[in-house]
Image (tube, coloured by chain):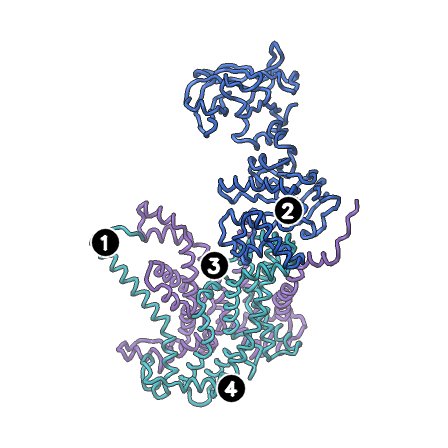
Chain colours: A cyan, B purple, C blue
Amino acid sequence: MSDHTYSPAQGQSVLWMRLLLWALLILFAIWFLLPAYVVVGTSLKDLEEIRGGSLLALPHELNFSAWKHAWNEACIGVRCTGLEPYFWNSVFMALPAVFISTLLGALTGYALTKFQFRGANMIFALILFGCFVPFQVVILPMAQTLGRLGITNTVYGLILVHSVYGLAFTTLFFRNYYVTIPDELVRAATIDGAGFFTIFRRIILPLSPPIIVVSVIWQFTQIWNDFLFGASFTTGGAQPITVAMNNLVNTTTGVKQYNVDMAAALITAAPTLFVYIVAGRYFVRGLTAGSVKG
Amino acid sequence: MSRPPIPFTDRIARALPQIVVAPSFAAILFFVYGFIAWTGYISMSKSKMLPNYDFVGIRQYWRLFQMDRWSVALENLFIFGFLFIAVAIVIGCLLAVLLDQRIRAEGFIRTIYLYPMAISFIITGTAWKWIMNPSLGLETVVRGWGWESFRFGWTNDETLAVYALVMAAVWQSAGFVMALFLSALRSVDQDIIKAASLDGASPWKIYTRIILPSMRPVFMSAVVILAHLAIKSFDLVVALTGGGPGYASTLPANFMYEMTFRRNEIGVGAASAMVMLATVAAIMVPYLYSELRGKKHV
Amino acid sequence: MASLTIKNAVKRYGNVEVLKGVDIDLEDGEFLVLLGASGCGKSTLLNMIAGLESVTEGEIMIGDRVINDVHPKDRDIAMVFQSYALYPNMSVGKNISFGLEMRGVPKKERDQAVQEVAKMLQMDHLLDRKPSQLSGGQRQRVAMGRALVRRPEVFLFDEPLSNLDAKLRLEMRTEIKRLHKRLNATMVYVTHDQIEALTLADRIAILKDGEVQQLGTPAEIYDRPVNMFVAGLVGSPPMNFIEATVVRTDSGYAAEVMVRAAGADQTVLLDLDAQAADVSDRVGRKIIVGLRPEAITQAGQKAGGDAQSFPSDIDVTEATGADTLCVLHWNGKEVMARVSSGYAQIIEGTMDFAVDMSRASLFDPETEKRLD
């Protein structure tokens, strides 16, 4: 832990500890990377190579035909359109839902922290519990409600669902961020003559980019990766990509095309992985923010 | 002396915070609490294929607990939940301690450990299912290396399928636990560590006696969040084992989906959902209560 | 400019009464300091004047206008906060002009007003910087500028100097005093620092547990504290409280104290004849004699008109520069005396001290109230 001088014997044991440390780190890294390696490798092979060769063997050549097939030819159920339309379904579902839930979460968090009205804590506790409700318990009424609103099996239905259930998390994020902004700022602005929305727009929002990034990344990841709501409320052409991908993999007609399955998995994972690699720092902050309440 | 009445616009301005919170709160009240009540009622109704509001008391619950599929699902949840939480915490904690040793390329290695958190359980399931493929997967590869008795086709084995779920779920979540612990490790007061090493404590002692005990709150958070993840687990099962073989690896969430959307047993499905909610509430409510109460007066 | 009237102001949160009926009348241009420990209600009262907290009962008036229900922005007040509360995302210039912008003042006038204030506070060169680029003292100036630019009826200060280091605090204190003279504005200033209170205030209101203990000029507060709480709060080092028995003497009454001199306790009678208080009915009973350290000083150095002097042992001395504080033992307790620094060489031993009993305050040991 500190820079003491070691005797040669101690130096030996420190070296061994260091080797053990690195051995463990690399072993775990292999375990974490194995699926990624296998998925990418398989997606680049043709079926001959998959059946004939080893799972861990490198592909003979970079063959992207499985990717192309998964993107716009593969059959999902009876529709052989590839994943492309479903990819756009997910995009059109995720973007508005992320925007709405983030905006509402920011406003709610702001009102709950900077204007401590009677019952604000109670309201927050009730909203917070919404983060942890198992969604199975809301699926049935939701299906009925969507039916009555006439938006079953549409992107709009999923936008509504994800906006509402994401709201609990975004409120938590913003609330926890805004409690760290001094109340005196709001008081000073009030005396300066700014109202609720002016303070939000001119003072609070300019301070919010870090938490906005966290909220957007979290919501985008959650919504893109959702399977339960997509599977419960949509069928056929309105499905989000996760559901379509699962159907593609489990379509039993014809020869099992493992390379196409893996390419489909990659395409489905690509957007969130991209976000993770570009803005991993904020992604981690969102993950840990969910566990630090109060 | 009479005071002038408060102008109407001022009243509105004063109520703005409440007005702004109202839609969100109303949405949560309706879509969360209202729906829970709704599902609760359906779980006590005659509903089969369509919702039916004839009250039958706890008959659906009684039927639920008669079903072998449900007992299997509950049993699986306990096995899966316990192993998943325990293993994920042990590995996550180990990784955090390893990464805390001032190693080079820490950021890079952390990125590798954490990337599974960014992808969907559906993809995790699909990938591991392929790796566990009995004829083309890792099993064949390792046997080819000479280890003839190696078995990795867990997804096709009635007893092993649950462990396949644990394996994939740990793979996905261990990095998250690591991130939690690592940030807690980094926030331990450095002066205490200095004081301890001046007192002659070895690094091992410092970890086991000072640092790890001080992380109890993080440990609690990790347990609660993982437990919550375990109870909600649905997509991983769908993609990895499909609940099979048969229904050997089904979990309550999958049971609920199966009953509600495939078997026209809405009442039983609702009852199973309520049991899941009760389980989550039993874990979350005390936790949230202590978290909120502890910090309210700061 | 306007007067400020607080009539029986009460603040309750649920069942907890934070302010229990405060009455303060402030004339136009007066500088009032609210002094008290944290939790005494002084900040709550200030926030009520600002309109940031509602008034449970009573009335607050600026001029002859009741402002209980008037929105803060319409009260014609400005406030300087302890943390300065500068908007982090805005430049200094924007920070200062924000209030004017909110009131719809045209850009040209705003710029001009900002320039004027910046010149007055000597910070014209800082206008384009962000608050995070400023030092503590500069931030404090910006916060002042933000209040000044609007030329309000009443200025409110919430412990504005407590985040500054000692030297800056002195500088800014003088600056605030100068501003008050120049603007001749009504000001209310909250602090827990009694020296700030004494130096700045026209009048001081001392609060404890939501009640005003004493409202008066700094001299009244310092020389004639109404109770032991006020006496102990103001002055540094604090007033000595000496428990003494009242006895009859030839000329009238005296307080009997045991003073340690030459290693033994000696009886000393502190003459009470200069006191306005009537102690005739207290003969044989205890009273508290309050003596500020400067009322006990070296003999011969003419402490006052009719100072009496007697020897006392010095336990410890603390040189503060201008003066030296000596710790004496009276009635078995420590008593502080202030001696001019010419005597700083004296470390231990016995010395003659003069006590000016005309500056003493007498208190009832039960009620802790001043006897007058």
As displayed, is residue C105 above or below residue C309?
Answer: below
Q: Is residue B198 visible?
A: yes
Q: Residue furthest bottom?
A: A254
Do marks 2 and 1 share a subunit?
no
Q: Amino acid at mark 2?
A: Asn
- Read off the residue under disc 1: A10
In primary-sequence order, the first of circles 1 and 4 is: 1
Callout 1 and callout 4 share a chain: yes
Residue at the image point whose x is 34% and y is 71% from the top:
A30
Q: Nearer the viewer, mark 1 or mark 4?
A: 1
Q: Nearer the viewer, mark 4 or mark 2?
A: 2
* C134 relative position to A60: left or right: right
Numbered badge on residue A77: 4
Q: Are marks 2 and 3 in contact (CB under 8 Å)?
A: no
**Mark 1 Cα shell of 10 Å, populated few (<14), some (14-19), many (≥20):** few
Asked whether C100 or A93 is in front, the reply is C100
Identify the secondary structure beneath mark 3: helix
Q: Nearer the viewer, mark 2 or mark 3?
A: 2
Q: Amino acid at mark 4?
A: Gly
In the picture, the disc for residue C47 is 2
Q: Quadrant of residue C44?
A: top right
Q: Which mark is residue B221?
A: 3
Between the residue at mark 2 and the residue at mark 1, the CA separation in whole angstroms equals 64 Å
Q: How far apart, in angstroms, are the residues tagged by discs 1 and 4?
A: 65 Å
- The span from disc 4 to disc 3 (Cα, nearest Å) is 41 Å
Q: Is residue B86 above or below residue C2?
A: below
Residue density around tag 3, few if under 14, some if 14–19, many if 20 or more, within 10 Å: many
- Under mark 3, the amino acid is Ser
- Disc 1 marks which amino acid? Gln
- Determine the residue positioned at 50% across, 78% down: A242
